[in-house]
Image (cartoon, rainbow, N blue to C red):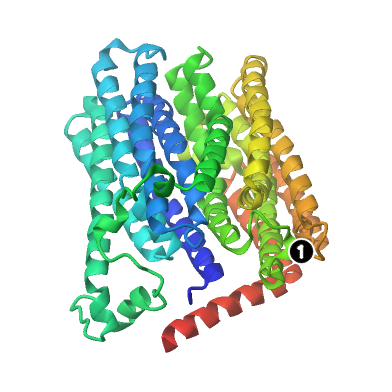
Amino acid sequence: MGRNLLMSSLENASFNILLQILFRCVTFIINAWVIRNVGHEIIGIMNVRLLLLESTILFLSREPFHRACLGQKDEFIWHQVMNQIWLSVPLSCLLSFVFVYIWLNILPLGHPELVFQYEFGCWSVALSCILELCSANIVLVTQLFCFVKLKVILDTLHIFVRTVLFLSIIIYDRSLALIAFSVAQVGSIAVIVLAYYLFFYWYIKFKPLYAKGALKVKFLPNHILERLYSNMDDFNFTSLRDFFPKYLGSVNSSFNKKLNTLTLSFAKQGVVKQVLTEGEKYVMSVSPVMTFTEQATYDVVNNLGSLAARFVFRPIEDSSYFYFTQMVSRDLPLCKQDQNKIQESCTVLSQVCKIVSSIGLVVLVFGLSYSRTLLTLYGGEVFVASGLPVQLLQSHCLAIVLMAINGITECYTFATMTSAQLNSYNYLMVFFSISFLILSYVLTYVLGPVGFIISNCINMFARIVHSVHFISNKTKDTDFRPLQGLYVGKYFLITLFIAGCICKFSENTFFYNSMVTHIAIGMICLICVLLSWGYENKHLIIKTYQKFVKSEEKMATD
């Protein structure tokens, strides 16, 4: 197979970062408009309650199957992989009925005038989840065969359709905000699912013509066709029927036992990880900790505080997980595998650790001095008057450092654990999740909403310790020490410390008199920090640049 997995992962991460920036910018603009024209309560219901329902159904029904099947296309026959991934659809139907019942009958709403719209929203979210999982098979193939730009284009289309539908309805009648959210959710997902199937119908239909050299498409230049069809000899799909389940004579032959075991392991892990990821929203939903207005404020600040995680860390983690599953075998010790692959994967892990740790530290240092500035620009003086939003955002800055390290170390851990190790880790995750929920509940009553973030920091630190221990044991019989990448460099740390002191002084001196001066000082300090990082890591910058240049040259010659 001629596809470059490392370059595909880097390209995927780059496009996903840009896509996340676009998506978050659109979301922030819509949220700001809704807050000013509809009300905080609507934001709380949409962004906390309904999106939590979507996250719960999708994560529990999609994540185990997708992760289990992601690295297995060369080990099992395609029909077994397709049969396995399609099990997510009936599971999502079952989970939808269970969780919609809980959302409607157990979780309090407190707004009688919104009951109908809320019920409509819950069922619409459930329907959108089921529709989305009908394309889980296509999404898996898209990632495995490196159709990076296709996913980016369709995700962008998804954002566009959802935004147009939502704004069209809410501008017509502001009282129908939840209806607008629901229609936009279902409509945008339906468009994306249809687009995925139409693309692969076209791709499969014309693949034989390309092999004969007879394919000509008016709206696509030849070099784009070459990128789509070159190095795709292992793409053996001949009809859209190959993407659907197929009975192979018996249950044992239709499903692979090892794949079932791996899926079950990820399912157990998924339940716990979902609690850890969305724990504060579950606590908010099941207990009277905060009103919907307060939840909306927390959600706005939480979204601002997690910009780095959504824009940078999550795309890097997704691409890295795919890369590690392809490069490292779960069932063999590293010393018994292809050492060239192991060396490359350890180098990538070390470099990614250094990059995300550096980003996290930059966010922490500058966030402590510029949280008030950012929130004032976003929500105005009234929004930050209580001081709580500033405290929340500053606390998030600490969480981002831990989030950066935890994300990539846990990514490598999950990608290289055996099924037995995954099962053992599930029990530890149960302990983490229970501790997290208890800490969240207790610290929230003691410290207020900041308690959510503090409990999350404690939980992530414990998970980092476990992942570091696992990676150290995994690589102890080799000459590679990828965790050394967590040390970001002496000059970088010194420059960062000096910049932090200058920015804090600037906030205390210039913020109330001249915010522009305060921002300008921060930009100068940031440039100095980035230059110091570039000086210490010039070999990494040069190596990455050379890889991209070689990739572009190869595509040009092809």
Q: Nearer the viewer, residue 484 or 257?
A: 257
Residue pointed to by mark 1:
335
- Residue 534: x percent and y percent? 69, 68
- Residue 400: x percent and y percent? 64, 43
Q: Amino acid at mark 1?
A: Cys
Instruction: State the residue at coordinates (30%, 58%).
Output: 242
Q: Nearer the viewer, residue 264 or 503?
A: 264
Count the marks: how many? Answer: 1
User: Is 313 above or below relative to 393?
Assistant: below
Instruction: State the residue at coordinates (61%, 52%).
Output: 415
Residue 237 falls left or right of residue 415: left
Residue 266, located in which quarter of the rendered image? top right
Q: Secondary structure at mark 1?
A: helix
Quarter of the image for the C terminus: give it: bottom left
Question: Can residue 392 be seen from the camera position used here?
Answer: yes
Residue 283, located in which quarter of the rendered image? top right
Residue 73 falls left or right of residue 486: left
- Residue 355: x percent and y percent? 66, 59
Q: Nearer the viewer, residue 270 or 75?
A: 75
- In this view, which residue lies farthest toward the bottom? 557
Instruction: State the residue at coordinates (71%, 61%).
Output: 350
- Residue 447: x percent and y percent? 66, 19
Q: Residues within 10 Å of mark 1 (few under 14, many from 20)?
A: some
Q: Nearer the viewer, residue 320 or 214?
A: 214
Question: Can residue 375 be seen from the camera position used here?
Answer: no
